[in-house]
Amino acid sequence: MHHLRKLGLASFFLLGLGLVIGALPRSTTGWTPRTAVVLALICYGLGLILALVAFMNAQRRENLDSTTKFLARGPLALVTIGVLVFFLRAMILG
């Protein structure tokens, strides 16, 4: 498996894990809300770093198949879209 695929999959996994950790109810995990936020932010941070590394490495290589391009560039695109949605909601709602 190509190393960019591995980086992209790891980034997707960490971003998804951060989302799941933040969405789980307290009764399921037994964590305090502060612990859940800290763990979610750690997962988001690591996922974003891996997404940036994969995206930058995918830009330099020209002969990549479509699956590798998607897995290398997709996580950063999802983060960008998510930030744009939150920004627009904040601007619209005041």
Image (cartoon, helix red, strand yellow):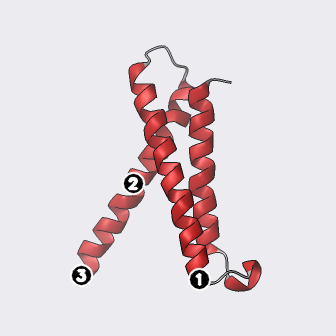
Residue type for callout 3: Gly
**Which one is earlier in the sequence, the residue at label 2 or at label 1?**
1
**Which one is earlier in the sequence, the residue at label 2 or at label 3?**
2
For label 1, the residue is 33
At x 60%, y 75%, the residue is: 36
Question: Do the residues under discs 2 and 3 have CB atoms within 8 angstroms?
Answer: no
Q: Quadrant of the C terminus?
A: bottom left
At x 56%, y 55%, the residue is: 15
Q: Quadrant of the N terminus?
A: top right
| Residue 3 picture location, percent across and down | 60, 27
For label 2, the residue is 81
- Asked whether the viewer can see residue 49, the reply is yes
- Residues under labels 2 and 3: Cα distance? 20 Å
Label 3 element class? loop
Label 2 element class? helix
Q: Nearer the viewer, mark 2 or mark 1?
A: 1
| Residue 30 picture location, percent across and down | 73, 82
